Amino acid sequence: MILNQRRSSLGTILSYVYLVFLTVICVVPFYMMLINGTRGSVAINQGVSFIPGTYLIQNFMNLITKVNLFQGFINTVIISVGATALTLYVSALTAWGFAIYEFRFKKLLWGLVLVIIMIPNTLGIIGFYELMLNLHLIDNYLALILPAGAASVTVFFLHQYIKGGIPRDFYEAAQIDGAKELYTFHKIALPLMVPGLATMGIFAFVGSWNNFLQPLIILYSPSHLTLPLLISELNSTAYKTDFGVVYLGIGLTVLPLLLIFALFSRYILNGLTMGGVKE
C-alpha cells in the first residue's frame, strides 16, 4: 500500500516536472521575442537577455514609420472576422444537414468532404488566383473572405459535435411542433452548438489572422495589406538589420492571438471534449 502511494507520488511529481518543462519551452521563445522588441540591434547582437531594454518607444516609432501598422491591423481584423463568421455559419449549416437529414448521395458527398480535408491548400493556389481574377476580386477583401465558407475541417468537427452533443430528440420535437427547418437550425441547433462553434471560431480566426500566402497573391495596394504582409516587409533588405523593430512588429502581431487563447481556452477544451464523444 505504502509502495503504491510512493509510486503514485513519484509519478505525479514527474508529470508536473514534465509539464513545467513543456511550459518553459513554449513560453520562453515568446518572452524573448517581446524582450528583444524593447532592445536595440546592437544589444541583440551582443547576446541574450531576459531583462527588458529601453528601446521600446524608439522601436515602436520606427515601426509605425516604416509600415502602416494601424491600417494593417484594421485590414487583418476585417478579413479575419468576416472569414470566421462565414466559416462558422456555412459549416454549421452544412454539418447540421449531414448529421440530421437523409438524402441521396449523402455518403458520397460526405466522402468528398473527407477527401478535401486531405488536399493541401497550396495545391489549388493557381486555380484560386485565376478564379479571383475572373471574378474581378483581385486586391479585394472578399477574395479572402468568401472562400472561407468552404471549410471542410470545420464541417467535419461540427458534424461530430452534433452527433455527440445534440440529441436528435430536440430536432424531432421541433418538427412535431411544426417548426420550419431554418427556424429549428437558428433557434435550437445553433445555441446548442455554441461551445463547438467557439472552438472552431478560434481556430478559424487564428488561421485567417496568420494567413500569408493568399493575401500575398491577392492584395497589392499598400492600404490593403494585412499584418503578416507588413511584417514580411520588415525582413526585407532595407529593414532586416533593425532587429528590435522586427521583433516588436512580430510581437504586436502575435499578442492578440495569445490573448484570444488565454481568454477562450476553456471553450477550446469544452468543444474538443464534446466533439470527441458520440451517442
Image (spheres, helix red, strand yellow):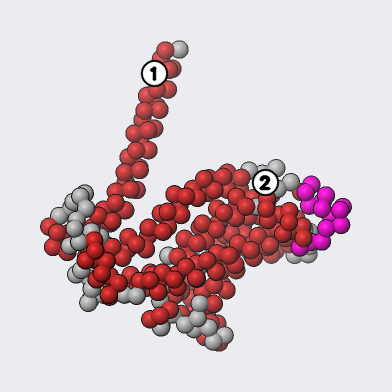
Q: Secondary structure at mark 1?
A: helix
Mark 1 surroundings: few (<14), some (14-19) or many (≥20) residues within 10 A? few
Q: Position of residue 19 (x, y in %)?
A: 37, 38
Q: Is residue 6 above or below residue 131?
A: above
**Residue 199: where, in percent of width, then height?**
55, 53
Give 64 or 151, whichever is nearer the viewer. Answer: 64
Percent across and percent down for residue 227 are 38, 70
Left or right of 259 in this view: 53: left
The kind of residue on which mark 1 rests is Arg
Residue ID at (70%, 48%): 166
**x%, y% of residue 39?**
19, 59
Is 184 placed above or below 214 here?
above
Q: Which residue is mark 2?
A: 165
- The type of residue carrying mark 2 is Gly
Q: Which quarter of the image is occupied by the C terminus?
A: top right
Give the label, 1 or 2, closer to the camera: 2
Q: Is residue 32 above or below residue 273?
A: below
| Number of numbered discs visible in the structure rendering | 2
Residue in the foreground of this view, choosing between 4 and 92: 92
Q: Which residues are magenta?
A: 169-182
Mark yes or no: residue 160 visible: no
Q: Quadrant of residue 155?
A: bottom right
Disc 1 designates what residue?
Answer: 6
| Residue at (37% x, 58% y) in the render | 255
The first of marks 1 and 2 along the sequence is 1
Examine the structure image and report whether residue 181 is included in the region drawn in magenta: yes
- Looking at the image, which residue is at 54% across and 72% down? 145
Q: Residue at x 63, y 43 (%)?
A: 277
Q: How many residues crowd mark 2 within 10 Å: few (<14), some (14–19), many (20+)?
A: many
Question: What is the CA distance from the residue labelled 1 to the residue labelled 2?
Answer: 39 Å
Residue 189 relative to residue 254: left or right: right
For residue 163, the mark is: none
